[in-house]
Image: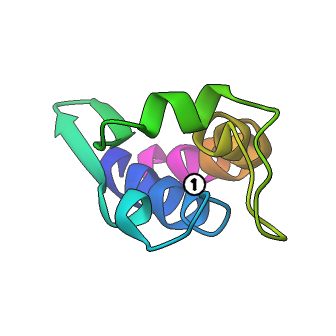
Amino acid sequence: AVGDVAEYLLETANRTVPIEESTLQDSGSVAQEGLNAAVGYDTPYACRQHEETGYQHDAGRRAKWPALTCKEEKEKCHKFLADKVKF
């Protein structure tokens, strides 16, 4: 369930990732170890793109896309996990 939520967050974050040639989006991945999972992007400029709120992006694209996606999707993810662990 944890991996499923992380994959969902990656897919959802990719909808707003800054995009020019899709290199940043294509570098997105999920890493999971036990009950911990992380969504990340692996380009030399991923961190800068995340933090620079003054950059101009195409419509629908934004800085802080993973952090904002997590915040926006938090309730949906909590519900999904809660439903999965019910006995």
> Would you say residue 42 sits in the magenta stretch?
no
Residue drawn at x 80%, y 51% is: 56
Q: Position of residue 73 (x, y in %)?
A: 71, 49
Q: Nearer the viewer, residue 55 or 85?
A: 55
User: Magenta segment, which residues?
Assistant: 80-87
* Residue bearing mark 1: 80
Most frequent secondary structure within the magenta stretch? helix
Q: Position of residue 39 (x, y in %)?
A: 38, 42
Q: Is residue 4 left or right of residue 29?
A: right
Q: Nearer the viewer, residue 4 or 64?
A: 64
- Type of the residue with mark 1: Phe
Q: Position of residue 29 (x, y in %)?
A: 28, 52
- Position above or below: 83 against 22: above
Q: Nearer the viewer, residue 10 or 45?
A: 45
Residue drawn at x 27%, y 30% is: 35
Splitting the image into 4 quarters, where does residue 64 fall? Answer: top right
Q: Position of residue 36 (x, y in %)?
A: 29, 28
